Image: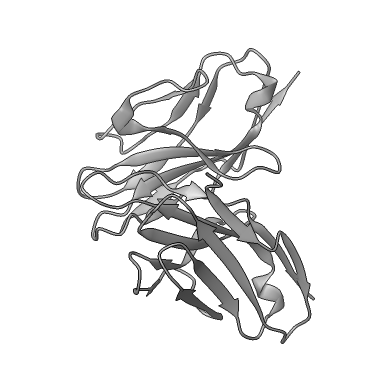
Amino acid sequence: NAGVTQTPKFQVLKTGQSMTLQCAQDMNHNSMYWYRQDPGMGLRLIYYSASEGTTDKGEVPNGYNVSRLNKREFSLRLESAAPSQTSVYFCASTKVGSSTDTQYFGPGTRLTVL
Amino acid sequence: AQRVTQPEKLLSVFKGAPVELKCNYSYSGSPELFWYVQYSRQRLQLLLRHISRESIKGFTADLNKGETSFHLKKPFAQEEDSAMYYCALLHGSSNTGKLIFGQGTTLQVKP
């Protein structure tokens, strides 16, 4: 099992450019999440998908869109990147049910917006 | 509102000293709490969860409902414990598996 994978690992964008961060999991988890990690702010939830076909806003959704392509894949799109979106982005997944499992994290994408 | 607070950004100790990373939470029901760790250049991983009542890598954490705390402790710090530690609370109002994270504490263990 690869667990949770993310691409790319690093990306540099210019202000106004767009890009999509990809995330996939092979653990048959039903819920997936996108976080951003900033110094002194901890991890903040951007969007999540509780199950295939559903997505919901988290704490900091502005400037982002998501797509739950299928049960395995959950992508995050920046339509017009801004310097404030410079951050490390983590994808995570978990199995939610009668006994909710812990969240498993991907390796992260380090994004710089110039 | 559900909230997790880690009051220390940085905790610096010498090898062999006791360690306590503080975590306080705000939640009206029965909380489910976790500690995650992120070693340098690695992904976040679960360290322990309170319902398991286990000790991982010598770390323990006890839920204190009266003080709404879930502090992480280790009696003798090792250099390999240096990492970022996050306390997290399972969001209780919906069956989504969402976690609310604290701001994180960097533990630095000096030789």
Tell me if residue A6 can be seen.
yes
Residue B107 placement (x, y as % from top left): 63, 33
- In the image, A30: left or right of A109? left
Residue A45 placement (x, y as % from top left): 47, 63
Which one is nearer the viewer's eye here, A43 or A71? A71
What color scheme is it? one colour
Q: Relative to residue A83, is residue A91 depicted above or below?
A: above
- In the image, B68: left or right of A57? left
Q: Quadrant of residue B17?
A: top right
Tell me if residue B107 can be seen.
no
Q: Relative to residue B4, is residue B61 depicted above or below?
A: above
Q: Relative to residue A110, is residue A57 depicted above or below?
A: below
Which one is nearer the viewer's eye here, A10 or B91? A10
Q: Name the residue: 61% across, 59% down.
A: A6
- In the image, B103: left or right of A109? left
Q: Quadrant of residue B81?
A: top right
Which one is nearer the viewer's eye here, B5 or A101? A101
Q: Name the residue: 47% across, 47% down.
A: A104
Residue B26 placement (x, y as % from top left): 32, 49
Q: Name the residue: 60% across, 45% down.
A: B43
Q: Quadrant of the N terminus of chain B?
A: bottom left
